Protein backbone atom coordinates (compact mmCIF):
# COMPACT_ATOMS: atom_id res chain seq x y z
CA UNK A 1 0.00 0.00 0.00
CA UNK A 2 2.77 2.43 0.91
CA UNK A 3 4.78 1.57 -2.21
CA UNK A 4 1.69 2.22 -4.36
CA UNK A 5 1.25 5.68 -2.83
CA UNK A 6 4.94 6.36 -3.38
CA UNK A 7 4.69 5.40 -7.06
CA UNK A 8 1.66 7.66 -7.51
CA UNK A 9 3.51 10.58 -5.93
CA UNK A 10 6.37 10.07 -8.38
CA UNK A 11 3.93 10.41 -11.28
CA UNK A 12 2.58 13.58 -9.68
CA UNK A 13 6.05 15.13 -9.55
CA UNK A 14 6.58 14.06 -13.17
CA UNK A 15 3.43 15.86 -14.34
CA UNK A 16 4.21 19.13 -12.53
CA UNK A 17 7.91 19.14 -13.43
CA UNK A 18 7.46 20.87 -16.87
CA UNK A 19 6.04 23.96 -15.18
CA UNK A 20 8.94 24.24 -12.74
CA UNK A 21 11.53 23.59 -15.46
CA UNK A 22 10.04 26.30 -17.69
CA UNK A 23 9.71 28.68 -14.72
CA UNK A 24 13.34 28.05 -13.75
CA UNK A 25 14.73 28.62 -17.26
CA UNK A 26 12.55 31.48 -18.48
CA UNK A 27 11.63 33.31 -15.24
CA UNK A 28 13.83 32.64 -12.23
CA UNK A 29 17.19 32.62 -14.04
CA UNK A 30 16.47 35.92 -15.91
CA UNK A 31 15.25 37.51 -12.66
CA UNK A 32 18.45 36.56 -10.83
CA UNK A 33 20.61 37.54 -13.81
CA UNK A 34 18.89 40.95 -13.96
CA UNK A 35 19.72 41.48 -10.29
CA UNK A 36 23.35 40.62 -11.08
CA UNK A 37 23.35 43.07 -14.02
CA UNK A 38 21.98 45.88 -11.83
CA UNK A 39 25.43 46.04 -10.19
CA UNK A 40 27.22 46.06 -13.55
CA UNK A 41 27.93 48.45 -16.40
CA UNK A 42 27.16 46.57 -19.61
CA UNK A 43 26.29 47.64 -23.12
CA UNK A 44 25.52 44.14 -24.41
CA UNK A 45 28.71 43.92 -26.44
CA UNK A 46 31.66 44.22 -24.08
CA UNK A 47 32.21 42.26 -20.87
CA UNK A 48 30.17 43.48 -17.84
CA UNK A 49 32.12 45.69 -15.43
CA UNK A 50 31.25 45.62 -11.72
CA UNK A 51 30.37 49.11 -10.45
CA UNK A 52 28.65 48.23 -7.16
CA UNK A 53 25.62 50.33 -6.23
CA UNK A 54 26.39 53.12 -8.74
CA UNK A 55 23.32 52.30 -10.85
CA UNK A 56 21.04 52.65 -7.82
CA UNK A 57 22.74 55.88 -6.73
CA UNK A 58 22.29 57.20 -10.25
CA UNK A 59 18.64 56.17 -10.09
CA UNK A 60 18.03 58.22 -6.94
CA UNK A 61 19.40 61.31 -8.70
CA UNK A 62 17.65 60.76 -12.03
CA UNK A 63 14.86 63.33 -12.63
CA UNK A 64 13.52 61.33 -15.60
CA UNK A 65 12.94 58.28 -13.38
CA UNK A 66 10.95 60.30 -10.84
CA UNK A 67 9.07 61.92 -13.71
CA UNK A 68 8.18 58.46 -15.03
CA UNK A 69 6.93 57.43 -11.56
CA UNK A 70 4.70 60.52 -11.35
CA UNK A 71 3.33 59.96 -14.87
CA UNK A 72 2.61 56.30 -14.12
CA UNK A 73 0.67 57.13 -10.96
CA UNK A 74 -1.33 59.93 -12.60
CA UNK A 75 -2.34 57.71 -15.53
CA UNK A 76 -3.14 54.78 -13.22
CA UNK A 77 -5.22 56.77 -10.69
CA UNK A 78 -7.23 58.56 -13.39
CA UNK A 79 -7.89 55.18 -15.03
CA UNK A 80 -8.58 52.93 -12.05
CA UNK A 81 -11.35 54.92 -10.33
CA UNK A 82 -13.81 55.02 -13.29
CA UNK A 83 -12.67 51.56 -14.42
CA UNK A 84 -13.61 49.73 -11.21
CA UNK A 85 -16.69 51.92 -10.58
CA UNK A 86 -18.07 51.27 -14.07
CA UNK A 87 -17.25 47.55 -13.81
CA UNK A 88 -19.11 47.24 -10.49
CA UNK A 89 -22.13 49.23 -11.70
CA UNK A 90 -22.48 47.17 -14.89
CA UNK A 91 -21.97 43.92 -12.97
CA UNK A 92 -24.84 44.77 -10.61
CA UNK A 93 -27.10 45.71 -13.54
CA UNK A 94 -26.25 42.67 -15.68
CA UNK A 95 -26.67 40.36 -12.70
CA UNK A 96 -30.36 41.26 -12.44
CA UNK A 97 -32.68 38.49 -13.60
CA UNK A 98 -35.04 40.77 -15.54
CA UNK A 99 -32.29 42.10 -17.87
CA UNK A 100 -32.63 40.62 -21.37
CA UNK A 101 -29.62 39.91 -23.56
CA UNK A 102 -27.26 40.04 -20.58
CA UNK A 103 -24.91 37.45 -22.10
CA UNK A 104 -24.59 39.53 -25.27
CA UNK A 105 -23.71 42.66 -23.32
CA UNK A 106 -21.20 40.78 -21.17
CA UNK A 107 -19.44 39.61 -24.32
CA UNK A 108 -19.50 43.10 -25.86
CA UNK A 109 -18.07 44.73 -22.73
CA UNK A 110 -15.38 42.07 -22.41
CA UNK A 111 -14.33 42.31 -26.07
CA UNK A 112 -11.79 45.19 -25.63
CA UNK A 113 -9.85 43.02 -23.21
CA UNK A 114 -8.90 40.54 -25.94
CA UNK A 115 -7.47 43.28 -28.18
CA UNK A 116 -3.74 43.78 -27.76
CA UNK A 117 -2.63 47.06 -26.12
CA UNK A 118 -0.45 47.82 -29.17
CA UNK A 119 -3.51 47.66 -31.43
CA UNK A 120 -5.49 49.87 -29.06
CA UNK A 121 -2.61 52.33 -28.89
CA UNK A 122 -2.49 52.65 -32.67
CA UNK A 123 -6.28 52.95 -32.83
CA UNK A 124 -6.42 55.72 -30.21
CA UNK A 125 -3.49 57.50 -31.90
CA UNK A 126 -5.49 57.58 -35.15
CA UNK A 127 -8.73 58.57 -33.42
CA UNK A 128 -7.16 61.50 -31.56
CA UNK A 129 -4.88 62.70 -34.36
CA UNK A 130 -5.28 66.48 -34.36
CA UNK A 131 -5.48 66.77 -38.17
CA UNK A 132 -7.34 63.68 -39.38
CA UNK A 133 -8.65 62.11 -36.17
CA UNK A 134 -12.30 61.05 -35.99
CA UNK A 135 -12.75 62.55 -32.51
CA UNK A 136 -12.00 66.10 -33.69
CA UNK A 137 -14.18 65.64 -36.78
CA UNK A 138 -17.08 64.39 -34.65
CA UNK A 139 -16.77 67.27 -32.16
CA UNK A 140 -16.61 69.79 -34.97
CA UNK A 141 -19.61 68.17 -36.65
CA UNK A 142 -21.59 68.54 -33.42
CA UNK A 143 -20.51 72.17 -33.13
CA UNK A 144 -18.74 71.63 -29.81
CA UNK A 145 -15.38 72.93 -31.08
CA UNK A 146 -14.44 75.39 -33.83
CA UNK A 147 -10.90 74.14 -34.56
CA UNK A 148 -8.99 70.92 -34.15
CA UNK A 149 -7.63 70.11 -30.69
CA UNK A 150 -4.04 68.93 -30.50
CA UNK A 151 -4.76 66.18 -27.95
CA UNK A 152 -1.20 64.90 -27.76
CA UNK A 153 0.21 68.42 -27.55
CA UNK A 154 -1.14 68.92 -24.03
CA UNK A 155 0.49 66.95 -21.15
CA UNK A 156 -2.73 66.36 -19.20
CA UNK A 157 -4.86 65.52 -22.24
CA UNK A 158 -2.31 62.97 -23.46
CA UNK A 159 -2.37 61.31 -20.02
CA UNK A 160 -6.18 61.32 -20.02
CA UNK A 161 -6.24 59.57 -23.40
CA UNK A 162 -4.03 56.74 -22.10
CA UNK A 163 -6.16 56.51 -18.93
CA UNK A 164 -9.31 56.28 -21.06
CA UNK A 165 -7.68 53.56 -23.17
CA UNK A 166 -6.80 51.51 -20.07
CA UNK A 167 -10.26 52.00 -18.58
CA UNK A 168 -11.96 50.89 -21.80
CA UNK A 169 -9.71 47.85 -22.16
CA UNK A 170 -9.99 46.42 -18.65
CA UNK A 171 -13.39 47.39 -17.23
CA UNK A 172 -15.06 44.42 -18.97
CA UNK A 173 -12.64 41.94 -17.40
CA UNK A 174 -13.25 43.34 -13.91
CA UNK A 175 -16.99 43.36 -14.62
CA UNK A 176 -16.95 39.59 -15.22
CA UNK A 177 -15.07 39.06 -11.95
CA UNK A 178 -17.68 41.10 -10.09
CA UNK A 179 -20.51 39.17 -11.77
CA UNK A 180 -18.90 35.90 -10.66
CA UNK A 181 -18.66 37.27 -7.13
CA UNK A 182 -22.29 38.43 -7.16
CA UNK A 183 -23.51 35.05 -8.35
CA UNK A 184 -21.72 33.37 -5.43
CA UNK A 185 -23.82 35.33 -2.90
CA UNK A 186 -26.69 33.12 -1.63
CA UNK A 187 -30.18 34.25 -2.68
CA UNK A 188 -31.43 33.43 0.81
CA UNK A 189 -29.62 36.51 2.19
CA UNK A 190 -31.44 38.81 -0.22
CA UNK A 191 -34.77 37.11 0.45
CA UNK A 192 -34.35 37.48 4.22
CA UNK A 193 -33.44 41.17 3.82
CA UNK A 194 -36.49 41.81 1.61
CA UNK A 195 -38.77 40.11 4.13
CA UNK A 196 -37.34 42.40 6.83
CA UNK A 197 -38.20 45.39 4.64
CA UNK A 198 -34.64 46.46 3.79
CA UNK A 199 -34.28 48.98 0.96
CA UNK A 200 -32.14 48.28 -2.12
CA UNK A 201 -29.52 50.71 -0.83
CA UNK A 202 -29.24 48.90 2.51
CA UNK A 203 -29.12 45.53 0.78
CA UNK A 204 -26.28 46.78 -1.41
CA UNK A 205 -24.32 48.30 1.49
CA UNK A 206 -24.95 45.58 4.11
CA UNK A 207 -24.99 42.43 1.96
CA UNK A 208 -23.68 42.90 -1.57
CA UNK A 209 -20.52 44.92 -0.93
CA UNK A 210 -19.38 43.03 2.22
CA UNK A 211 -19.89 39.66 0.49
CA UNK A 212 -18.11 40.98 -2.59
CA UNK A 213 -15.11 42.23 -0.63
CA UNK A 214 -12.71 39.36 -1.54
CA UNK A 215 -13.31 40.05 -5.24
CA UNK A 216 -12.91 43.80 -4.68
CA UNK A 217 -9.58 43.20 -2.94
CA UNK A 218 -8.42 40.97 -5.80
CA UNK A 219 -9.35 43.47 -8.52
CA UNK A 220 -7.72 46.37 -6.65
CA UNK A 221 -4.45 44.50 -6.15
CA UNK A 222 -4.30 43.21 -9.74
CA UNK A 223 -5.16 46.71 -10.99
CA UNK A 224 -2.26 48.13 -8.99
CA UNK A 225 0.14 45.51 -10.34
CA UNK A 226 -1.05 45.87 -13.93
CA UNK A 227 -1.57 49.63 -13.88
CA UNK A 228 1.94 50.41 -12.65
CA UNK A 229 3.40 48.29 -15.47
CA UNK A 230 1.73 50.13 -18.36
CA UNK A 231 3.99 50.11 -21.39
CA UNK A 232 2.47 49.08 -24.74
CA UNK A 233 -0.15 51.79 -25.20
CA UNK A 234 2.04 54.74 -24.05
CA UNK A 235 4.83 53.47 -26.30
CA UNK A 236 2.51 53.57 -29.32
CA UNK A 237 1.31 57.07 -28.42
CA UNK A 238 4.81 58.45 -27.75
CA UNK A 239 6.37 60.22 -24.77
CA UNK A 240 4.08 63.23 -25.11
CA UNK A 241 4.97 66.87 -24.49
CA UNK A 242 7.34 67.38 -21.54
CA UNK A 243 7.66 63.56 -21.30
CA UNK A 244 4.10 63.53 -19.93
CA UNK A 245 3.40 59.91 -20.91
CA UNK A 246 6.80 58.44 -20.07
CA UNK A 247 6.10 55.54 -17.67
CA UNK A 248 8.48 53.50 -15.54
CA UNK A 249 8.49 50.52 -17.91
CA UNK A 250 8.87 52.79 -20.94
CA UNK A 251 11.93 54.35 -19.32
CA UNK A 252 13.29 50.88 -18.57
CA UNK A 253 12.80 49.93 -22.23
CA UNK A 254 14.48 53.08 -23.52
CA UNK A 255 17.53 52.73 -21.29
CA UNK A 256 17.95 49.01 -21.95
CA UNK A 257 17.00 48.47 -25.59
CA UNK A 258 17.51 51.89 -27.16
CA UNK A 259 20.53 53.21 -25.26
CA UNK A 260 21.94 49.73 -24.48
CA UNK A 261 22.57 50.57 -20.82
CA UNK A 262 21.49 47.17 -19.53
CA UNK A 263 22.90 47.59 -16.03
CA UNK A 264 20.95 50.78 -15.41
CA UNK A 265 17.87 49.24 -17.04
CA UNK A 266 18.08 46.31 -14.61
CA UNK A 267 18.29 48.77 -11.70
CA UNK A 268 15.14 50.53 -12.99
CA UNK A 269 13.39 47.14 -13.21
CA UNK A 270 14.13 46.32 -9.59
CA UNK A 271 13.15 49.80 -8.43
CA UNK A 272 9.82 49.42 -10.28
CA UNK A 273 9.38 45.99 -8.66
CA UNK A 274 9.87 47.47 -5.18
CA UNK A 275 7.41 50.33 -5.88
CA UNK A 276 4.75 47.93 -7.22
CA UNK A 277 5.28 45.56 -4.27
CA UNK A 278 4.90 48.38 -1.71
CA UNK A 279 1.71 49.72 -3.23
CA UNK A 280 0.26 46.23 -3.67
CA UNK A 281 0.80 45.57 0.05
CA UNK A 282 -0.70 48.96 0.96
CA UNK A 283 -3.74 48.26 -1.25
CA UNK A 284 -4.23 44.83 0.36
CA UNK A 285 -3.96 46.29 3.87
CA UNK A 286 -6.35 49.16 3.17
CA UNK A 287 -8.85 46.87 1.42
CA UNK A 288 -8.89 44.43 4.35
CA UNK A 289 -8.82 47.07 7.08
CA UNK A 290 -12.48 46.80 8.00
CA UNK A 291 -12.94 43.15 7.14
Image (tube, grey):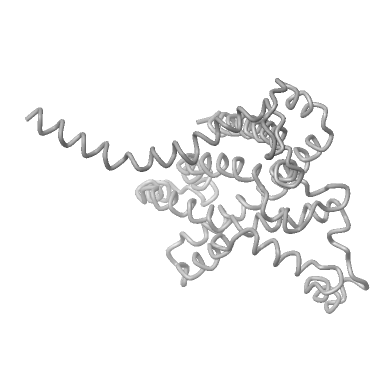
Q: Hey, which residue is sitting farthest bottom in the picture?
A: 141
| Residue 127 as seen in the image, left or right of residue 89 | right
| Residue 17 as seen in the image, left or right of residue 82 | left
Would you place residue 200 above or below residue 2 in this image? Answer: below
Residue 70, given in percent of the width and then of the height, sits at 78, 39
Residue 180, given in percent of the width and then of the height, sits at 43, 52
How many numbered markers are drawn?
Answer: 0
Give the quadrant of residue 71.
Answer: top right
| Residue sitting at x 35%, y 48% | 188
Would you place residue 119 above or below residue 229 in this image? Answer: below
- In depth, the one of 93 and 30 nearer the eye is 30
Q: Hey, which residue is sitting farthest right in the picture?
A: 146
Residue 288, given in percent of the width and then of the height, sits at 53, 31
Examine the rendering and report whether any part of residue 73 can be seen.
no
- In depth, the one of 6 and 205 nearer the eye is 6
| Residue sitting at x 10%, y 27% | 2
Would you place residue 158 above or below residue 202 in this image? Answer: below
Q: Hey, which residue is sitting farthest left in the picture?
A: 1
Q: Hey, which residue is sitting farthest top in the picture?
A: 52
Q: Where does the N terminus fall, quadrant-wise?
A: top left
| Residue 201 as seen in the image, left or right of residue 256 | left
Residue 237, given in percent of the width and then of the height, sits at 76, 58
| Residue sitting at x 49%, y 41% | 26
Examine the rendering and report whether any part of residue 18 can be seen.
yes
| Residue sitting at x 72%, y 48% | 78
| Residue 72 as seen in the image, left or right of residue 200 | right
- In depth, the one of 208 and 80 nearer the eye is 80
Amino acid sequence: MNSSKLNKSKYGYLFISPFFIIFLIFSLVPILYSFYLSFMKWDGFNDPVFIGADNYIRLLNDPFFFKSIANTFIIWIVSIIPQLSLALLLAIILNEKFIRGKHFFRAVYYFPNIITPVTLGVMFALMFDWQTGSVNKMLMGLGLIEENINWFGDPMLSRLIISALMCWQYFGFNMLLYIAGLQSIPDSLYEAAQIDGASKWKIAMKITLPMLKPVLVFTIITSVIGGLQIFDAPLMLGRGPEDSTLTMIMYLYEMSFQKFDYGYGAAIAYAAFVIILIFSIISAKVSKMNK
